[in-house]
Image: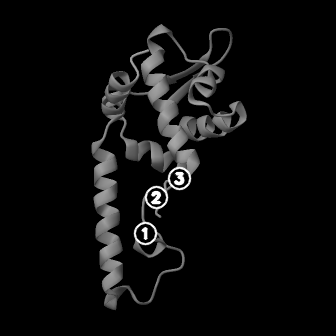
Amino acid sequence: MIRIPTQGRYAVRAMIDIGRHQEGGPVPRQEIARRQEISANYAAQIFRRLTAAGLVKSVKGPGGGYVLSREPAQISAGDILRAIEGPLALVHCVLDDDETPCDRTDKCATHRLWSRLSQTMEDYLDAVTLANLIDESATLDPA
């Protein structure tokens, strides 16, 4: 099974949560963690990375929390996953910055397979916006 790690999945859920609830101002991390059933400490790790990537802004003080740094239509699922997990690829040998390059890539049919599949996955994740996910979330759970 090919998996998206837990932290990446939780980050996408947390971003949808902010997008759905930020109209009233910054969304407290504890509320996001509670609604998404994520521990507050784990959520803190996620939000550090999302903030560093420029996807959310942290608002300090009373009434503080997190807000999206851009419009939801300007943030893709790929942006969120890259912020948390790094480059999107199925195998290490298809990365351009691979520190341990494979000496078989020029003659390896599977390298081309993994490269094409990785590109297709990345293109799809970049085509799905946070706005799309927020809209879908609202139809699945109107509350």
Q: Residue type at mark 1?
A: Leu
The mark nearer the N terminus, 3 or 1, is 3
Mark 3 and mark 2 residues within 8 Å of each other at the beta carbon: yes
The residue shown at (39%, 47%) is 78
Q: Which residue is at the front of the view, 104 or 51?
A: 104
The residue shown at (53%, 53%) is 85
- Nearer mark to the viewer, of 3 and 1: 3
- What is the x, y in percent for residue 25? 51, 11
Q: In the displayed orientation, state which residue is furthest to the right.
A: 41
Mark 2 and mark 1 residues within 8 Å of each other at the beta carbon: yes
The mark nearer the N terminus, 2 or 1, is 2
Is 40 placed above or below 61 here? below
Mark drawn on residue 77? none
Check disc 1 and report the residue beneath it. Answer: 95
Confirm whether residue 17 shows in the render: yes
Is 126 placed above or below 72 here? below
Q: Residue type at mark 2?
A: Pro
The residue shown at (36%, 40%) is 76
Instruction: Give the distance between the C-alpha atoms of the residues marked 3 and 1, in whole angstroms.
Output: 14 Å
Check disc 3 and report the residue beneath it. Answer: 85
Check disc 2 and report the residue beneath it. Answer: 87
Q: Residue type at mark 3?
A: Glu
